[in-house]
Image: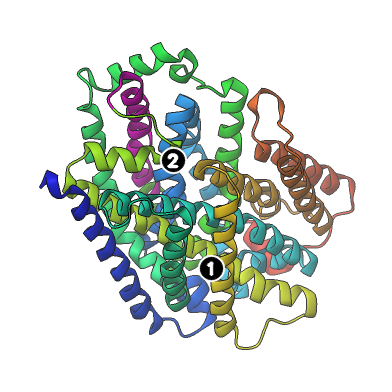
Amino acid sequence: MEANRALITLLAVIAYLVLCVAIGLWSLSRTTSTQDFFVAGRRLGTFVTAFAIFSSTMSGFGFVGGPGLMYSMGTSSIWILGTIVISNIIVLNLVAKRIRMVAELRECVSLPDVAAARYGAQSVRASVAIVILLGVLGYLATQILAMSIVLRGVLADAGVLENPSLALCVAISCSVLIFYSVTGGIVASVYTDVIQGAIMIVASVLVFITVLGTFDGGLAEISRIVAADDRAAGGPWGTIGIMGALAWFFVFGIGVAGQPHIITKFMMLRRMKELRYVIPLGVLAYSVAALLWIGIGFAMRALVITGGHPALATPDAASPEFLQTFTHPLLAGVVFAALLAAIMSTADAFLNIGAAAVMHDLPIAIRGRSLGNELAWARIITALLALAAAVVALYSGDLVALLGAFGWGTFAAGLVPVIAIGLNWKRANALAANVAIASSLFVNFGLRLGGIRLPYGIDHGAGALVVSLVLFLSISFLTKPEPVPRDIERVMDL
């Protein structure tokens, strides 16, 4: 079986890609309206919703970028994982219940719909749609790049192509993604999340057990080797230092309340009372899957240090290389297939919210009505967004994890004040919302495009979030309060 390792992995990946096509065709018959395409007809149960949220959170960022961060920066990325409990408490108490109720009251199909209902201003709808569109391109590029890196490793190891180019793998990945997303919408995504989420939880435990067996002494010995080579990498803050690590904790801990691909899942829930079970299930799944993030990244660094594996061409190769070299062939095949499933479903979620912003929210904000034949336009825009993100993935030059962090920071800085605070604070107004979003984009994109680094390794997204929060709170305090629609006010009073 060991001799056929690469073939087994390739067959597993091919089987999954065929399954994606089948799921897309099955979902086509269940997607007959924009409500179905964007919010799954608001008929998801507890288990499906919980795993959809879990998969959207981890995806390519967690299963490829996460180990890459552990490999390159040591324990720094553990501060991202450490936010899991506090971030979900924030989401449950500030966002989940209110966004679900507003969505039902106003028949919302997108986050900008919710923002427009809260502030009573189409300008806020447009601002939220723009920040979503820009963030989607960065985060969607993360998923396509992660999928392409995995596919390139599988094709090369199986001998199908001697040295497959990244561009070819991006083209293959993007083609399957477009078919899957265009035919099935969000329905295709959420129902595959249940299967692949369960597989990834089991696989993460098995992979972590494999990690413990790579060195006598297990994780303690791995940590000792890494710390001996680079004291900072094995220390409490990793190589980016205390301020950089705490900045990640800040932007990922608070920022989850502004991630549209996560919080819009609550709009799809069938019954309000199921909220109390959705978040604990998601936290449990995420915590188990984090074993893969930590284990592979640290183990590969220790293996390279001790000569047990050649140096990696890029940190993003840590996960594919470990799976192909050190795990059982069947486990590697299953993990690769489930990994592609996680990436594919999350990419579909991003395409979904991006398409809604372009063909539903921006037209309403600009001309007072959405495009005619919304379902057809949703599918056309979905394909165009996927192609645009593929270009970003090819030419950005960034690692998967850094692209993911940028997308997360864009959403966090732009949407946390407007959504998480705005749905709970009646004094917040449309002017403050628009200024907060504009400032977050200016700071985040300005620093990045200008090549400006913040001191002490502080993430751009964290800096942008601080600026947008300060402006949002200050303007809301200093300007005259605006009346809140009565039905929205009743939701905020709960």
| Residue at the spot 66% in from the left edge and 23% down from the top edge | 456
Which disc is residue 352 wearing?
1
Category of crowding for the residue at label 1, using alpha-carbon neighbours closer than 10 angstroms: few (below 14), some (14–19), many (at least 20): many
| Residue at the spot 68% in from the left edge and 65% down from the top edge | 488
Q: How many marks?
A: 2
Q: Assign the C terminus to one quadrant of the image.
A: bottom right
Residue 213, image x, y percentages: 19, 27
| Residue at the spot 46% in from the left edge and 46% down from the top edge | 61
Describe the element under mark 2 as helix, strand or loop: helix
Residue 35, image x, y percentages: 52, 78
- Type of residue at label 1? Asn
Residue 208, image x, y percentages: 26, 35
> Is 294 inside the magenta-drawn segment?
yes
| Residue at the spot 40% in from the left edge and 33% down from the top edge | 312
- Closest to the observer, 364 or 180: 180
Residue placed farthest to the right in the image? 479
Residue 371, image x, y percentages: 67, 83
Q: Which callout, 1 or 2, points at the residue further toward the start of the chain? A: 2
Residue beneath disc 2: 316
Residues under labels 1 and 2: Cα distance?
A: 26 Å
Relative to 185, 116 lies left or right: right
- Type of residue at label 2? Asp
The stretch in magenta equals 282-308
Describe the element under mark 1 as helix, strand or loop: helix
